[in-house]
Amino acid sequence: MNYIIEKFDHIITSLSSSDKMNGGLKREEANDIIKDCEEEKERIRLQIMEEVFNAREERTLELLIDKYQSVFIRLIDQLYTYQQTNKKQHEYKLLSKALYGYLNELLYFLQIHYAKYFNHFQKMPFIKMEYIKKELKPKLDTIIAAFHRTILNEKLIRLIVQPLEQFISSNAITYNESQYMKTIMGEFLAIDTTVQEEDIIAIVKKILISINFNSSDLTAYLINELDTLVADEESVQGKLRILKYQLKEINQVTIKPEYVLHNDCGSLKEQIINWLNEEISFYQTEQAVVIAMPNPIVSDTKIHTSLSVPQLALLFRLLKEEQLITNTNQSELLKVVSSCFTTMHKESFSYGHLHGKYYKIEQHTKRTVYDMLIRLLHLSRKIG
């Protein structure tokens, strides 16, 4: 391979070096070199075809195409750098333009005729990167403007837009990344922005899942949204209903194969489904405990409180862990509490509900109970 690329390599290196070809180049000489390079291009193309024909193993073919692809991209980048930094006479420009055309033809030949072995994870030539970025920048601006008009959630917008902006500013874009960004921007531009905000957000989320927009920050955001939705529902049965509905919705999203934002991260759809399945398993266990251990009625008299069930559960957990309550059978203790107490919103609540909140304390409950305990501390100092 090195031998058949040698002529192109030598000419481009000479163009790029200040100590070579500095004596001037006549038009006739430039035309002769261009004609010779055109013939060389055909020789290289035929040589590639012959080598491919003689290759007996798939891995050999992959390596062969990958090596030619790398060399062509390197030489195209050298020409691009030369064209950006040098303002020599017209004949040099004609020569560099012709060389770029021939190398681009060879690269395109590999991409079309040996698509199966073309390495889409290789960096694109600089000149192609610039073209792609110029093509996609106005589209990104349109998407950002549409999001700000129709979606009030600034955090969600930022999580989506940031990777797209990083792509536009990147100096190392692969073929795969380029295709991914073209596809996702096309999906966003096709959204009907005349519908309600909640419908637009639902459409956007389905697009993100279908095209595997697996940013770790976005994954955490979507899972946290689901966690908050479940936490707002008090009953175990209600939580299971929400989780199973969300699981059905996610499962029904069709995935576009081979599309992924980050190759080194897990699938966005799979991560969300795994979280939902874990939560479903947890609450199904809670539900089974309720069925196995029904609530006994200890007394008709109940202690009325202004607490919520999560707050009551946390208070009794604190008392138990500090050993201010010394009952050894924790389940029996919770059954007594669920039968003897009322909360601000419920005259009665199930043992299973209290049991679930006892073992899964949410952050906002911790903050509320902490503030309440501080108030009790101050109150204790005032009591004479």
Image (cartoon, rainbow, N blue to C red):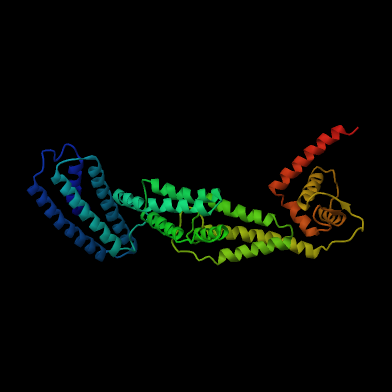
Residue lying at the far left of the rendered structure:
28
- Image quadrant for the C terminus? top right
- For the point 81% across and 34% down, which residue is it? 378
Is 151 placed left or right of 85 in the picture?
right
Q: Quadrant of residue 294?
A: bottom right
Residue nearest the observer in this picture, 141 or 220: 141
Q: Position of residue 266 (x, y in %)?
A: 51, 56
Against 293, is 342 above or below? above
- Image quadrant for the N terminus? bottom left
Q: Position of residue 81 (x, y in %)?
A: 26, 43
Is 141 placed left or right of 21 in the picture?
right
Against 335, is 325 above or below? above
- Please say whether residue 345 is visible from this viewpoint: yes
- Please say whether residue 123 is visible from this viewpoint: no
- For the point 30% across and 48% down, which residue is it? 126
Total number of numbered discs in the rendering: 0
Residue nearest the observer in this picture, 355 or 3: 355
Is 274 placed left or right of 314 in the picture?
left
Q: Quadrant of residue 119?
A: bottom left
Is 75 placed left or right of 367 in the picture?
left
- For the point 25% across and 46% down, which residue is it? 80
Q: Position of residue 182 (x, y in %)?
A: 39, 57
Q: Position of residue 229 (x, y in %)?
A: 65, 56
